Image (cartoon, helix red, strand yellow):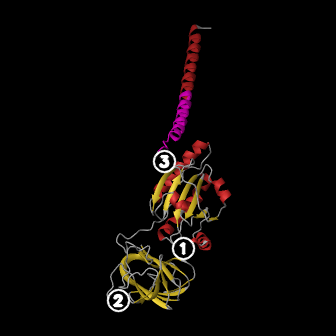
């Protein structure tokens, strides 16, 4: 073999060996980097310092279970990221959050999210399981709801507000806490993060990250009439009953509406019994007058009555008619709970008048948005 040919073959073998060596080196480096990244991800999850977080308390004092049983719920809670939603069905602030909560349930339940609605009632009628069942059906709630009628779970969470959302990781540590409406994107991002942590820790597959729930958020009026309480217990420290007769705890009082009305106060006409949670109409007819500023008005009532609503002495027009007024300005109350009576685009000052026919009608609050 010629020297030139032998030299060329040797040189070619050297080049091929070098290429193979470099390729193997890069392959090994990529493998090492991938391994290091996986180790770092695992390390990041395992290194979350949970000493500063509290464990979620047990669900205690539960009167009823909806959409589940005690045994099934206990089983379903194992190794799940859990959103505890403390709510009550006549609370407008709670109701406004439900579209987000129900949508999160649809999106993430298969990835390890469990939502538990803790229904802690504000008023006595909200303890009735049939009333809560109707609300659960009305708002399309399919996740478990537990009735915390004596506030034992409420107290275990050291809670003081409606609504309130706690998110616990798969090990039971409360990693997020939000009071009231809003912060929906922040809450959902926490859910996604904790589901990713769970997937890595348990070695399970999780669907790729989805876009956040896109629902138009209710925009509160910066200046509006505050919530008005008709029960003497709730009105302590925030008494806005404008009649000169005032509150008379436990007594039956005949009220008459004065000539001069003040905004953000409510006024009664007729004979009413003063109760801890609200006012109960004793006479066959009565009325409530409220000068207010807002774009939305809601009332919380109980027991049968025929109601008529007027704004500035005129029947409520279609441009102001609330979602629950389906027949002009009149309504017959059959269920106990929240009724939306005024719903407009912009906030403005008006005088609302409610004419009531039917003794035993009870009213608890007026809320404004």
Q: Residue at x 44, y 62 (%)?
A: 182
Q: State yes or no: residue 34 in magenta.
A: yes
Labels 1, 2: front one:
1
The residue singled out by tag 1 in the image is 124
Determine which of the numbered discs, if any, sits on residue 53 in the image: 3
Asked if labels 1 and 3 touch by Cβ distance under 8 angstroms, the answer is: no
Viewer-proximal residue among 226 and 252: 252
Q: CA distance from mark 3 to mark 1?
A: 34 Å
The answer to whether 41 appears left or right of 239 in the picture is: right
Locate residue 289, reporting x and y percent: 40, 85
Viewer-proximal residue among 146 and 137: 146
Determine which of the numbered discs, if any, sits on residue 66 in the image: none
Of the residues under marks 1 and 2, which one precedes in the sequence? 1
Viewer-proximal residue among 104 and 54: 54
Q: Is residue 133 above or below residue 108?
A: below
Q: Is residue 20 above or below residue 89?
A: above
């Amino acid at each position: 073999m010629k020297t030139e040919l032998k030299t060329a073959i040797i040189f070619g073998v050297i080049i091929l060996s070098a290429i193979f060596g470099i390729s193997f080196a890069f392959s090994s480096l990529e493998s090492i980097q991938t391994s290091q990244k996986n180790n770092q991800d695992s390390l990041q999850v395992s290194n979350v310092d949970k000493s500063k977080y509290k464990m979620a308390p047990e669900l205690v004092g539960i009167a009823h279970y909806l959409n589940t049983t005690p045994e099934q719920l206990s089983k379903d809670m194992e190794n799940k990221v859990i959103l505890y939603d403390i709510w009550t069905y006549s609370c407008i602030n709670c109701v406004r959050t439900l579209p987000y909560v129900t949508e999160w349930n649809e999106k993430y339940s298969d990835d390890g999210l469990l939502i538990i609605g803790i229904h802690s009632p504000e008023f006595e009628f909200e303890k009735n399981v049939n009333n809560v069942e109707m609300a659960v059906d009305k708002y399309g709630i399919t996740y478990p709801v537990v009735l915390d009628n004596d506030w034992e779970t409420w107290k275990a969470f050291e809670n003081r507000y409606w609504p309130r959302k706690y998110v616990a990781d798969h090990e039971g540590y409360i990693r997020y806490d939000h009071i009231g409406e809003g912060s929906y994107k922040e809450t959902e991002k926490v859910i996604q993060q904790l589901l990713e942590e769970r997937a890595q820790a348990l070695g399970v597959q999780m669907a790729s990250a989805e876009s956040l729930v896109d629902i138009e958020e209710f925009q509160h009026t910066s200046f509006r009439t505050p919530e008005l309480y008709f029960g003497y217990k709730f009105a302590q420290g925030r008494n806005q009953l404008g009649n000169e007769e005032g509150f008379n705890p436990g007594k039956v009082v005949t009220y008459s509406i004065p000539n001069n009305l003040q905004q953000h106060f409510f006024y009664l006409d007729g004979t009413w019994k003063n109760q801890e949670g609200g006012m109960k109409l004793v006479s066959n007819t009565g009325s409530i007058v409220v000068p207010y500023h807002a774009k939305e008005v809601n009332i919380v009532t109980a027991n049968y009555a025929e109601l008529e609503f007027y704004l500035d002495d005129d029947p409520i027009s279609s441009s102001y008619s609330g979602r629950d007024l389906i027949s002009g300005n009149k309504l017959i109350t059959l269920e106990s709970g929240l009724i939306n009576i005024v719903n407009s685009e912009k906030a403005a000052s008006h005088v609302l008048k409610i004419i009531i026919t039917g003794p035993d009608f009870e009213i608890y609050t007026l809320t404004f948005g």
